[in-house]
Image: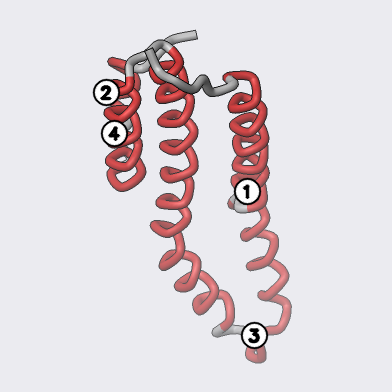
């Protein structure tokens, strides 16, 4: 049994806030907003004709970065939630495994380990 206990309620409050903020980030990056930007740029004709393609190129470059950010947020949330439960159940090795698997999921985007082995509920 571990010497210290982690307050699951406090952890859950933090994870809820992180997930809310992450959802807000996702909403801010919706395609509709970018479509409106592109439509707004077309009015300028020759003056702004190269701007939409430049902005599109920039956004395409950033897509993988935004996906990586999202993967890291989700992996950290899942890893922390599972590690907290394992730690409080005296399963320090399992807590460490969840932390390691969170790092892997953050990099790869593959959350299979948590689907198959994570705490449900």
Which mark is in front, 1 or 4?
4
- How far from the left and from the top, in percent, is residue 26? 59, 45
- How far from the left and from the top, in percent, is residue 60? 43, 64
Q: Are marks 2 and 4 in contact (CB under 8 Å)?
A: no
Would you call the spot at circle 1 few (<14 residues within 10 Å), some (14-19), or many (20 or more)? Answer: few
Q: Are marks 2 and 3 in contact (CB under 8 Å)?
A: no
Q: CA distance from mark 1 to mark 4?
A: 24 Å
Which mark is in front, 1 or 2?
2
Look at mark 4 in the image and give the residue it sits on.
101
Going from N to C along the chain, the mark reached first, 1 or 2, is 1
Circle 1 sits in a helix, a strand or a loop, which is it? helix
Which of these two is toward me, 96 or 28? 96
Circle 3 sits in a helix, a strand or a loop, which is it? loop
Look at mark 1 in the image and give the residue it sits on.
25
Q: CA distance from mark 2 to mark 3?
A: 58 Å
Which of these two is toward me, 70 or 100? 100
Q: CA distance from mark 3 to mark 4?
A: 47 Å
Find residue 11 and report its image quarter: top right
Look at mark 3 in the image and give the residue it sits on.
48
Q: How many marks?
A: 4
Going from N to C along the chain, the mark reached first, 2 or 3, is 3
Decide if residue 78 is on the left or right side of residue 111: right
Examine the rendered structure and indicate whether residue 72 appears above or below residue 115.
Answer: below
Going from N to C along the chain, the mark reached first, 2 or 4, is 2
Which of these two is toward me, 61 or 103? 103
Q: CA distance from mark 1 to mark 3?
A: 28 Å
Look at mark 2 in the image and give the residue it sits on.
93
Residue at 63%, 90% in the rendered image: 46
- How far from the left and from the top, in percent, is residue 58? 48, 72
Which mark is in front, 2 or 3?
2
Q: CA distance from mark 1 to mark 2?
A: 34 Å
Q: Are marks 1 and 3 in contact (CB under 8 Å)?
A: no
């Amino acid at each position: 049994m571990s010497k210290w206990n982690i307050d699951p309620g406090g952890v859950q409050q933090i994870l809820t806030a992180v997930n809310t903020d992450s959802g807000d980030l996702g909403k801010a990056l919706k395609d509709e907003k970018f479509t409106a930007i592109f439509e707004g740029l077309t009015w300028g004709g020759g003056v702004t004709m190269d701007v939409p393609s430049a902005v599109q190129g920039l956004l395409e470059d950033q897509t993988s970065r935004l996906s990586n950010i999202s993967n890291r947020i989700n992996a950290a949330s899942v890893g922390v939630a599972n590690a907290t439960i394992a730690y409080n159940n005296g399963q320090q090795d399992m807590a460490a495994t969840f932390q390691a698997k969170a790092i892997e999921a953050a990099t790869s985007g593959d959350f299979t380990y948590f689907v198959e082995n994570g705490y449900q509920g």
